[in-house]
Every structure is written in C-alpha cells, then in structure tokens.
C-alpha cells in the first residue's frame, strides 16, 4: 500500500522546560491557547493523507494519553489502523530501563512488531516538540523523485549548538552530520525523516545488532557514507520547544499576524482536541489588547499581549501583561502580572504582584495558590 505511515516520538529528554514538564512530556505542553505542541506534527501528517500514526512514548505520558485519546479529533479513530498509542511499559521488563529508552532506534526496537505490520511503503519519523506547518506530501514526492534512501527535512535558520546540522554537496546530498558544535553552521536538522519501511527495518536490525541506539549516531553519522541521505530544505516557520525561553518567545511570536497566518493556514489546518467550552466574555470596562484568548474565559480586568487558555478568569482591577495563563488560572482583583507563565488551575491572590523578565519568565507550578 503506497503512502506514508507516521511515527511520532514523545519521550523525556534533557530540557530547560522546568516546571512545564513536571506532569507531562514535551509534546503535551499546552501551546497557542487551544493546542498541545504535538497537535502540529500530528496535523501535518493528517493533512498529508496519513491515516495510520503510531506515537511512541515513555515517562510522564498520562497527559499525552488523555489528550490524544482515540484520535477522533484528528480523524484517526478507525477500525483498521488510525492512531496507535505505544507506551514503553512492557519494554521496561525486557531492558530494566523503567520504561525509558536511550534513543530512537532503541525506541523503535521496542515496537518492532508494530513496525513489521505497517501497511504503507514509506514511514515518516518525527519528534513531538516541533511547531511547524509543513506539506509532508511534497517531501514524500521529492523523496521518490530523487531516489534517496532517507530524506531529512532541514532549515537554513540556525538554532542552538545542541541541534544537529548537515553539510550538503551541490546536489543536496548530506555529506556530514554534526552536533553540539560551538559555532553552528550548515543546515539545521528538524528531525523529520522519510524512508521506506523495508529500509527502516533493515537499519533497525543492524543497529540493534551493534548496540547502536541513536538514529543520529547509528544511522545519520555512522552509515551516512553508504546511504543516500538527501536534504529537503524548509524555508518557513519552525520552532522547537525545548527550553522555557524558547517556549515563551515562540508563544509571544504568535501575537504577530504573519506568524499566525503561516502556522494556521486554511489549506493545512491544525487540529486540536475537541472543545465544548462556551464563548469567552470580555468586559468592555477592562480591556483585552493584542492577545489570544481561548473559549470559556472571563476577562473583566486588563489583559495585554497575553495568551489565555480555556477557563481563565481575570477579575476586575487585575492587570496582566506579557503572560501565558494555562487552563483554569484565576487572577484575583488588584493582582499585577508581568511575563508570568502559570500552569493549570493556578490562583493568583488579590493585590499580589508578580513581575519577571521576558528573557527569564516566572513559572507557577500546577495547582499553586500565590
């Protein structure tokens, strides 16, 4: 069966997201007022006609399990195929690893039986912490046109030194793969790869036989000389949510119309979990300026340059600016907030003042009363 099968990796890894991942993994971090980060990659797959997606996860995955459910919100609730959630609990018994894996090849090995029953000819591998709206069907077409073994999506926009970078020849073939270099150069890898199912299974068997657990090290670097790895360069918006500063900055970028129009374009919609909340109320006596406000909010104070998730309450006299308030946050009368991120169900008491810097926002943990 021609077409693509989606594999999304959702797991704990070294990060600077601090309190935001105390109760969740990276991909289930709330984003853009009404979504989770994983919704973007999942929607990219659905928009490309992918009907079967497996999500490999470990760690604090309850939030991810609750969010994805049966996959109905993404039209992936099907009798045959659809969304398959693949927690690594059984894997812990085999490797005594507490349900964790060291790298993507090891993660794929724990679901090898699932991979062997994939119906499609091609597989797209992706992380869950990437905010992007990309035409994956075009990537697949380029993959088939070039005859590459692996097609890797990358961007000319440089990122952090911890990212993976490619050096390309004149034909677009990857000739070198490096990571954690002091001065980043080349093309930054976005960790989206397309390859055939048969090649994936062959590489998996070979890597496991040599105790190579990393896709980057075992495939891109060690076998890069023998494989035809091609780069597909993406010139649009792409943001990896792996630090608190990145989360805050990327969230604030959504207040710019050109960024929103690129991420939320009509031809490739982003789907999120179904929302049955009522419309939000904004009191004219307060004021809401240049903000993203989800359904079910009650805004009677002043809100400026903020992102508010469902069910947020801002009482009269409260002044909130440059903040990201997760579901169920309550800001009491007279409170002042600047550059603050609140997790779910936080309460800010009357007349409290919380002020932080844009470069290092203050995070209030889930369920706290301040």
Image (cartoon, helix red, strand yellow):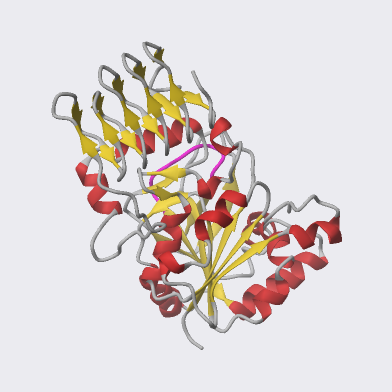
Secondary structure predominantly adopted by residues drawn in magenta: loop
x%, y% of residue 57?
64, 56
Q: Is residue 199 above or below residue 160?
A: below
Residue 219 position by quadrant: bottom right
Residue at image position (20%, 43%) is 257
Q: State the residue lying farthest toward the bottom.
A: 1
User: Number of numbered discs present?
Assistant: 0
Viewer-side residue, 300 vs 342: 300
x%, y% of residue 161?
53, 37
Residue at image position (63%, 61%) is 56
Provide the residue span drawn in magenta: 155-164
x%, y% of residue 22?
61, 36
Residue 93 placement, left or right of 370: right
Viewer-side residue, 283 vs 307: 283
Residue 265 position by quadrant: bottom left
Residue at image position (24%, 27%) is 300
Residue 107 placement, left or right of 41: right
x%, y% of residue 163?
54, 44
- Determine if residue 351 is in view: yes
Q: Is residue 144 above or below residue 297?
A: below
Q: Is residue 280 above or below residue 361?
A: below
- Determine if residue 212 is in view: no
Q: State the residue lying farthest toward the left.
A: 284
Residue 49 position by quadrant: bottom left
């Amino acid at each position: 069966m021609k077409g693509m099968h989606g594999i999304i990796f959702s797991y704990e890894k070294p990060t600077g997201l601090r309190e935001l991942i105390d109760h969740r993994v990276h991909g289930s971090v709330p984003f853009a007022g009404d979504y989770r980060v994983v919704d973007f990659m999942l929607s990219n797959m659905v928009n490309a006609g992918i009907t079967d997606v497996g999500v490999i996860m470990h760690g604090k995955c309850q939030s991810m399990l609750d969010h994805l459910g049966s996959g109905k919100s993404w039209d992936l609730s099907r009798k045959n195929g659809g969304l398959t959630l693949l927690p690594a609990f059984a894997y812990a018994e085999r490797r005594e690893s507490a349900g964790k894996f060291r790298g993507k090849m090891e993660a794929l090995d724990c679901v090898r039986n699932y991979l062997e029953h994939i119906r499609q000819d091609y597989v797209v591998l992706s992380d869950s912490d990437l905010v992007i709206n990309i035409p994956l069907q075009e990537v697949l077409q380029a993959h088939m046109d070039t005859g590459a073994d692996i097609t890797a999506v990358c961007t000319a926009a440089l990122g952090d030194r911890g990212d993976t970078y490619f050096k390309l020849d004149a034909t677009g073939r990857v000739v070198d793969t490096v990571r954690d270099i002091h001065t980043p150069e080349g093309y930054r890898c976005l960790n989206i790869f397309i390859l055939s199912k048969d090649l994936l299974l062959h590489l998996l068997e070979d890597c496991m036989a040599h105790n190579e657990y990393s896709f980057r090290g075992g495939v891109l670097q060690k076998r890069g000389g023998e494989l035809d790895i091609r780069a597909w360069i993406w010139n649009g918006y792409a943001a990896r949510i792996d630090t608190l500063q990145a989360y805050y900055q990327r969230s604030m970028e959504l207040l710019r119309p050109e960024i929103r129009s690129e991420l939320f374009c009509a031809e490739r919609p982003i789907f999120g979990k179904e929302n049955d909340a009522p419309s939000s109320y904004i009191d004219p006596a307060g004021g809401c300026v240049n903000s993203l406000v989800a359904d079910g909010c009650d805004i009677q104070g002043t809100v400026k340059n903020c992102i508010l998730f469902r069910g947020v309450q801002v009482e009269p006299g409260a002044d909130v600016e440059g903040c990201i308030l997760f579901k169920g946050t309550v800001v009491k009368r007279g409170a002042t907030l600047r550059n603050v991120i609140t997790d779910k169900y936080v309460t800010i008491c009357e007349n409290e003042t919380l002020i932080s810097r844009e470069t290092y926002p203050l995070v209030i943990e889930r369920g706290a009363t301040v």
